[in-house]
Structures are given as structure tokens and as C-alpha cells.
Image (cartoon, rainbow, N blue to C red):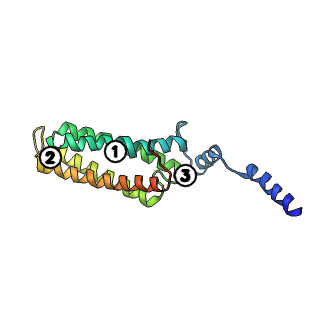
Amino acid sequence: MKKLFLLLGLIACFPATACDEDCKREKAMAENDVKFPSYLTASYCQDTSVTFLLRARESLQEYRDSQLKTGHKGGLRNISRFLKQRKEWLQECDRYLAMTDQGRIFRNETTTATIMASIDATIKELDRLVASGSGIYVPESQAEMAGQRLDQMFIAVDTHRTDLQLRGQLVIR
């Protein structure tokens, strides 16, 4: 009987000492002297991550397959800007999640670093091609170098997505 009362007492104490997302958010802002935007939540960050893993990946693959081979600098510039914007969103969420002790944007630090490095390498290659030479087109052989960077990024993203699916943390319908 004493064990039952002890167990009930412990269960009753947990909600009182638990720190929900708002509590973690306030604590992180106070400890790190930052102010998070009101839209920044764990749910928003999860949506941002999944959107990148699925929709942005799909859009980039479409560009890779149909437009990259033309070597048009305008398209290369647009894809670079697209990736820079998504990277900013992902980094903002990763910082928020890390500071509030809710994990990382891509499950753990290693995976996050790998995907971010592949995004950086792709952006760097695209920007290099846009800045190279004169004219509005780059040779197909040089455009293919950007394609290789995109492929490396796709591998990192797909590996993470598959890992999430195997763990039951990402369901695609």
C-alpha cells in the first residue's frame, strides 16, 4: 500500500516539475540573451524540416533533371538563392531547437552538419558558376559540376529521410 501511495505521489509531482515548450523557450531566451520570434516553435521547425526533405528536394530534383543542363546563369542564381533562403530557415530552427534542448533540425548534430555542409558546397558551386566568364550560359560540362554537388546533397538528404522513415518518424502519404 505504501508503494502505491509513493507511486501516486511521484506521478502527481511530475507535471509540477515538467518544463513545457514555453518554459524551455523562456529559459533559453534568458540564458542566451536572445529573443525568439513568436512563430518559432518545435512544430514550426518540424514542418520546415519536412518541407525541405520532401518539397524542396523534389523541386531541386526537377531543376536538376530538366533545367541544369542548359547552363543558364539565371536559373543557377535562382537555385542558389532558393538554397540560401532554405538554409537560413533551417539554421534558425536548428539554433532554436538546440537552445531549447529539443534536439536538432535533422535529428542530431552529425546529420545536421552533414546536410548543412552539402547545402553550402552546392551554393558555393552555383555561385562560382554564376560569377564565371561572360555571357548568360555556362558550358554544359561546368553545369554538370553543379549537378554533382546537387547529387551529393540529395544523397545526404535522402539518407536522413530514409532513416526517419525506418524509425517511424516520417510518414509520407
Name the disc covering residue 57, or none: 1
As shown in the figure, which amino acid type bears the numbered disc 3?
A: Met
Which of the marked residues, 2 or 3, is nearer the chain's N terminus?
A: 3
Q: Residue at x 26, y 41 (%)?
A: 62
**Circle 1 SS class:** helix
Q: Is residue 146 left or right of residue 88?
A: left
Nearest the camera: 163 or 76? 163
Whole-percent x and y of residue 21?
Answer: 62, 45
Q: Amino acid at mark 2?
A: Ser
163 or 74, which lies in front? 163
Q: Give left or right: position of 136 versus 57.
A: left
Callout 2 touching callout 3 (CB < 8 Å): no
In the figure, residue 56 lies in which quadrant? top left
* Disc 1 to disc 2: CB gap under 8 Å: no
**Mark 1–mark 2 distance (CA, rounded to whole Å):** 26 Å
Eyeballing the image, is 141 above or below 58?
A: below
